[in-house]
Image: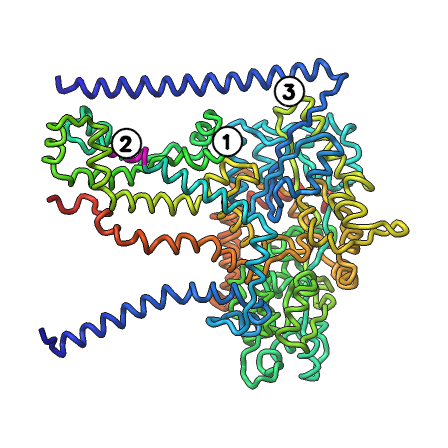
């Protein structure tokens, strides 16, 4: 089909707007990358703003990876992310699947309980008391278990499960499959998109884990990456006479930002394609 | 019929929660029992001291702490007094506040923790803090170290609730670009009027010679940038209390305040001030403006200008840049480099009341405080690191090694009782000694705000915000100075400032100021 002039004009405008939006997203990232690999004096000479580095040094990265607490924190975060996401997915599925079955007795009541927690929370102190009573203080589990199930993700998963045709369950049941078998062998393989989506939510959450670490962990060896990165970013606000020659320059700060966000940036594109399917929440029912 | 599943569900929920509660309840009781029994046995058999190190939990704000296995200061302290110190630092004050509040509310008290004046008051009123008055003798080393004035700062209603660090010295002065002055053929300003003239010239006469009008006279953090101007008019910074002619004054009510504001307005009107002045939140922001050559005068501390790394940055941007300190300006109200709060402390540490029941721990905390206050051992350790490794003694003088900056730059986190400021700085900043001395010896108005507790019903944050906003309007000409008295009226009534004024006056009079 030959496109009319109008179409072409329209398309060009759309592309232009998209390109601008894209640039808006890329510029800050470019700035961060450039500053992180440029000697700070060079940055200052350019009035504090550079987009393309003129001279390159990986000093900041080397320093961060060898001298600071970042390597250790990195592994803590990896552990929390991997184990935490696994725990999240298993528990969330186990919660969402029964709720998606219309025959569950007291379904709306349980649903109400789930939704209730989205609107009202116990607050910091009661939560802290529970974590303390469970003996989780100062352990990695304090950063995994209190947030093991996010109500919102339960709802996403539940509505995905509800879209699966009822006939599927009937025939499986006819063939003698129990609920666990149905969940494991029929529902799970069909639910890859929603698993990926919810998994990514959880993963990003764990990767950015910060608040629970600050609240429940006092042992420095268990601090996750973001806590350490934040510390580096905030070093500049310390009284200067005390941190002799340790004040990190902007170069260091940007490098730590890069180290903290790079893994997620890398993972994102691989999971992104599952998003549209997995994110549908009660819009179209087949 | 329809109700049944719901009942079943409800029953299930109740059951599970009771089981959970039972579980957790049992656990805490057990823990408490354990703690209690161990505490008891230890106190009973005090003679054969257990060799097991005592665990001490300390929290404060700060950053840069290494992990415990690389923390040489911690290891040395543990070795010296038989503790297992767990120091946790929080980079942001808000994070720290959250953590402290949660722990105080949930009864999971740290054994030693930093408090500010408001927290000290709050926790003391709630009965959560240990009154240290009976332990003064045991704490003698500490008390001697911090000095009698510091001791007063941790006192509430005559009871000693916190150990305040030994006092600091002022670092801030005006810094000015000497090379710019020379280029324009001007002399360092000595009065507010000369300051205005120089600042104007810096803005208009292209002192960096790049042909562009891209420079400003003065930069700094908010109205604090004008501290020496306030000083020259004989008034403290807005909100300061001080004694003037034998009477207690609040700077806002000092007649000189209006004159100072009028002068600041004149400087801003002349375009001689960094237009982003009011949005400069961190020192780094305006420090970089100075380094980049965007401003020729800044109100800043000496470390931010003279530390090696910053000198290197300054030289990298402009090899000719030459920053010098400016002595206090002489004005109609005298010659003061701003005000200096003699009631402020670099930090205070409190001990929870529950430690009363755990004498072993309490003794260790006291020992810890005494240890870091002992001149040749603990205090030297938390100031300079390990002798022979991070520093050497030559004829009684501390000579830092290269390792000091590299390995124990965080040692200040362990200075729970402060440090002898001048000696410390002269060792760590031998090169900067003249600047330190210069900043320290400038005449300053002695502000007393640090001694004042906010009365209940007075929200200092709200009042401060209102004050900042209105003063900004005055100096930027958005509100005529003729309305200054109306501003004070609003502040007094709707911001409850009157209550604060009265409380402060009474408290300060009680301490013997202005009488």
Q: Chain of mark 2?
A: A
The colour scheme is rainbow
Q: Disc 1 or 2, which lies upstream in sequence?
A: 2
Task: Give the image location of residue B245, x and y in percent.
Answer: 74, 54
Q: Give the residue at mark 1.
A: A137
Badge 1 element: loop
Of residues B166 and B332, the one nearer the viewer is: B166
> Residue B357 shows which numbered tag?
3
Report if residue A93 lies within the magenta region: yes
Tell me the CA gap for discs 3 and 1: 23 Å
Q: Are marks 2 and 3 in contact (CB under 8 Å)?
A: no
Q: Is residue B62 left or right of residue B53?
A: left
> Residue A94 shows which numbered tag?
2
Vertical placement of B17 versus A253: above or below? Answer: above
Vertical placement of B136 versus B145: above or below? Answer: above
Task: Give the image location of residue B268, x and y in percent.
Answer: 55, 71
Task: Give the image location of residue B225, x and y in percent.
Answer: 61, 64
The span shown in magenta is A90-96
Look at the image and tell me whether residue B406 can be seen.
yes
* Crowd tier of the residue under label 2, counting other residues whose Cα lies within 10 Å: few below 14, some 14–19, many 20 or above: some
Badge 3 element: helix
Q: Residue at point 45% right, 18% down?
A: B25
Q: Nearer the viewer, mark 3 or mark 1?
A: 1
Vertical placement of B8 versus B490: above or below? Answer: above
Badge 2 element: helix
Report if residue B198 lies within the magenta region: no
Q: Residue at point 76% right, 17% down?
A: B48
Of residues B152 and A60, the one nearer the viewer is: A60
Q: Quadrant of residue A154?
A: top left
């Amino acid at each position: 089909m030959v496109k009319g002039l109008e179409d072409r004009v329209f398309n060009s405008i759309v592309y232009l707007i998209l390109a601008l939006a894209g640039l808006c997203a890329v510029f800050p990232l470019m700035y961060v990358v450039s500053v992180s690999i440029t000697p700070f004096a060079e940055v200052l000479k350019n009035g504090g703003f550079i987009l393309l580095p003129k001279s390159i040094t990986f000093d900041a990265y080397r320093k961060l990876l060898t001298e600071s607490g970042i390597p250790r924190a990195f592994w803590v975060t990896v552990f929390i992310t991997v184990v935490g996401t696994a725990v999240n997915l298993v528990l969330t599925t186990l919660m969402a699947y029964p709720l998606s079955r219309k025959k569950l007795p007291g379904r709306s009541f349980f649903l109400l309980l789930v939704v209730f927690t989205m609107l009202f929370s116990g607050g910091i102190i009661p939560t802290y008391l529970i974590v303390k009573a469970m003996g989780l203080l100062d352990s990695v589990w304090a950063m995994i278990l209190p947030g093991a199930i996010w109500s919102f993700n339960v709802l996403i998963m539940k509505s995905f499960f509800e879209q699966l045709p009822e006939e599927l369950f009937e025939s499986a049941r006819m063939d003698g499959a129990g609920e666990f078998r149905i969940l494991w062998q029929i529902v799970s393989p069909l639910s890859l998109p929603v698993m990926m989506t919810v998994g990514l939510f959880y993963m990003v959450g764990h990767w950015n884990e910060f608040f629970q670490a600050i609240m429940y962990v006092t042992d420095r060896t268990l601090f996750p990456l973001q806590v350490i990165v934040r510390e580096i970013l905030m070093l500049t606000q310390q009284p200067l006479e005390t941190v002799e020659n340790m004040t990190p320059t902007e170069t260091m700060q940007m490098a730590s930002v890069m180290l903290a966000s790079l893994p997620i940036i890398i993972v994102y594109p691989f999971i992104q394609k599952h998003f549209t399917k997995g994110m549908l929440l009660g819009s179209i029912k087949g | 019929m329809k109700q049944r599943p719901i009942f079943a569900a409800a029953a299930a929920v109740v059951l599970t929660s009771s089981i959970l509660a039972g579980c957790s309840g049992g656990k805490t009781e057990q823990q408490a029992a354990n703690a209690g029994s161990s505490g008891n046995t230890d106190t009973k058999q005090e003679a054969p001291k257990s060799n097991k190190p005592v665990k001490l939990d300390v929290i404060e704000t700060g950053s840069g702490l290494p992990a415990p296995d690389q923390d040489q200061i911690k290891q040395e302290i543990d070795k010296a007094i038989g503790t297992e110190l767990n120091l946790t630092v929080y980079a942001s004050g808000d994070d720290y506040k959250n953590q402290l509040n949660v722990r105080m509310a949930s009864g999971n008290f740290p054994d030693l923790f930093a408090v500010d004046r408001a927290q000290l008051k709050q926790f003391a009123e709630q009965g959560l803090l240990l009154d240290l008055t009976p332990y003064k003798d045991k704490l003698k080393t500490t008390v001697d170290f911090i000095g009698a004035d510091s001791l007063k700062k941790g006192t509430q209603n005559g009871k000693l609730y916190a150990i305040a660090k030994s006092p600091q010295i002022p670092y801030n002065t005006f810094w000015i670009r000497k090379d710019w002055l020379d280029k324009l053929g001007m002399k360092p300003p000595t009065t507010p009027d000369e300051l205005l003239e120089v600042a104007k010239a810096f803005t208009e006469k292209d002192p960096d010679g790049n042909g562009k009008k891209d420079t400003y006279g003065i930069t700094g953090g908010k109205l604090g940038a004008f501290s020496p101007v306030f000083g020259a008019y004989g008034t403290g910074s807005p909100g300061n209390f001080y004694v003037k002619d034998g009477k207690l004054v609040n700077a806002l009510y000092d007649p000189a305040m209006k004159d100072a504001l009028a002068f600041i307005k004149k400087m801003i009107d002349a375009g001689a001030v960094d237009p982003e002045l009011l949005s400069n939140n961190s020192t780094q922001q305006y420090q970089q403006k100075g380094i980049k050559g965007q401003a020729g005068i800044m109100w800043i501390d000496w470390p931010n200008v003279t530390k090696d790394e910053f000198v290197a940055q300054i030289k990298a941007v402009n090899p000719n840049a030459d920053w010098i300190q400016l002595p206090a300006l002489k004005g109609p109200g005298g010659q003061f480099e701003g005000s200096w709060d003699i009631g402020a402390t670099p930090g205070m540490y409190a001990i929870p009341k529950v430690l009363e029941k755990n004498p072993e721990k309490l003794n260790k905390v006291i020992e810890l405080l005494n240890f870091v206050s002992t001149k040749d051992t603990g205090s030297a350790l938390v100031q300079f690191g390990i002798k022979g490794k991070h520093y050497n003694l030559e004829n009684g003088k501390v000579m830092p090694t290269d390792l000091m900056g590299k390995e124990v730059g965080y040692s200040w986190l362990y200075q729970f009782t402060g440090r002898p400021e001048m000696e410390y700085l002269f060792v760590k900043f031998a090169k900067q000694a003249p600047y330190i001395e210069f900043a320290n010896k400038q005449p300053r108005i002695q502000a007393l705000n640090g001694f004042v507790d906010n009365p209940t019903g007075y929200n200092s944050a709200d009042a401060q915000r209102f004050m900042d906003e209105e003063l900004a309007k005055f100096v930027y000409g958005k509100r005529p100075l003729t309305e200054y008295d109306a501003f004070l009226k609003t502040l007094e009534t709707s911001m409850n400032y009157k209550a604060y004024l009265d409380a402060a006056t009474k408290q300060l009079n009680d301490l013997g100021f202005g009488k």
